[in-house]
Image (cartoon, rainbow, N blue to C red):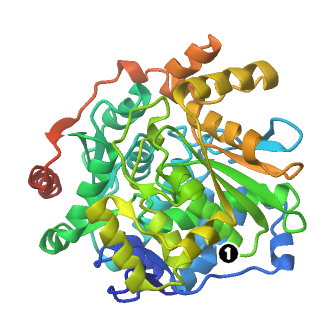
Amino acid sequence: MRYISTRGQAAPRDFESVLLAGLAEDGGLFVPDAWPEFTMAEWRALRGLPYPELAARVIHPFIGEGIPLDALREMTARAYSGFGHPAIAPLVQLDTSAFALELFHGPTLAFKDMAMQLLGLLFDHVLAKRGQRVTIVGATSGDTGSAAIEACRDRAAIDMVILHPEGRTSDVQRRQMTTVRAENVRNIAVQGSFDDCQDLVKAMFADAPFREEMHLSAVNSINWARIAAQIPYYAYAALALGAPDREVAVAVPTGNFGNVLAAWAARRMGLPIARFIVAANRNDILARFLAANDMSAREVEPSLSPSMDIQVSSNFERLLFELLGRDAHATAETMQRFRAEGRMPVPDAAWREATAFFTGFTLDDPGTLGEIRRLWVECGYLADPHTAIGTAAARSLAPPGMPTIIAATAHPAKFPDAVERATGIRPPLPARLADLYEREERYTVLPNDLASIEAAVRAHARRN
């Protein structure tokens, strides 16, 4: 398997090199040069397998022989061994055809653990084989940071710096990052939005001398390995609901487009996912694009679902590349205009192709609270704000009678204030996190300034 950049100016490379590089040198994102496909018989053969085994078989075509399948099996078994549910990603039926795919049973109670726990092991494997060390920089709107820290803490060949927007995560999300005692980890609160944090990470990668000096790598979903590790849970759920002999739909609360892109990748591999419902909060750039070809950035507005408080959805570039017929020049030009003008000029033909499979949905904070309340009263199901937006989207837009997989992306205890406002119930943290509010926090507040951030990254990496 070889990978190419969506902007066409970076040299093709193998999976291991893509894992370590994160972002392509030309500013683009790596994608497979050809999509692997499974036959109907191959999909059926995966039914009923334990999640770690299924994950290894689905991911391996994206890795190739650089990591043998048996070695990958060992990694997936280790990655999911500490999850709090034996099914790893259980399906919970909410009504006749709606099923919550619970992705929050990992160590940090969010769907990011599904990929991050495996990525930490992949980094260890590749870095040990190559005798290298990396500095991982990441931006988080709440969940990526804690999942990345948990996966990479205390690893000898990794230094890590995570940027989060000051005051724009939940208390639980922030504390899950800032209370970790690991010498190889540093947390920085940026005075700005998640989009500012994400731009700073991309700017560090674009600074070629700094990138080389620090041996930068990434754990955000700009790193293709993150997407590859998220594909299996959609396969796992779809197969349980009758695929490949039955079509399914997915409803995904999303901000950076990576989680729903993983579902789309499963379709490219041959799973019959007929409809992708993109669920957004008031930061609705993706819903506006799908409704009216309006991909225009606005100010990020804080909401009850902070992991979706995003206006620049990085992973959309991967879908854009496909919609433009894999024309790297057109993709680069479109993305550059978006950055310069704040509006993405997507050709009507490409937009119409997207709307053939993708539908957007938006829900404001009062609607989110109402949906959390409805789920509790009608279904006895306690959902966090992000998951509630996904369930509301499925109720509104799922094809009648079609099994619909709703990505339940976070444990309700990560957002106790919102859940309590809606239901009167304050969900407790699991026992392993019960003392979270008593732990000492450590983080640095810095301005939205590239020089300041780079200086902090350099100081951290050199100290270690």
Q: Name the residue located 41 percent from the left edge and 72 percent from the top edge.
A: 19
In the image shown, does 404 or 413 lie closer to the viewer?
404
| Residue 281 percent location from the top left of the image | 52, 39
Q: Quadrant of residue 263?
A: bottom right
| Residue 452 percent location from the top left of the image | 10, 49
Quick one: which residue is furthest to the top in this view?
Answer: 424
- Count neighbours of disc 1 (C-alpha within 10 A) and say few if under 14, some if 14 to 19, many if 20 or more: some
Q: Is residue 100 visible?
A: no
Tell me which amino acid carries mark 1.
Answer: Arg
419 with respect to 30 (left or right): right
47 with respect to 257 (left or right): right
Q: Which quarter of the rendered picture does the N terminus lie within?
A: bottom right
Q: Name the residue located 33 percent from the left edge and 45 percent from the top edge.
A: 194
Relative to residue 313, is residue 17 depicted above or below?
below
| Residue 246 percent location from the top left of the image | 89, 63
452 with respect to 62 (left or right): left
| Residue 167 percent location from the top left of the image | 30, 30
Q: Is residue 248 visible?
A: yes
The local secondary structure at tag 1 comes to helix
Q: Which residue is mark 1?
A: 268
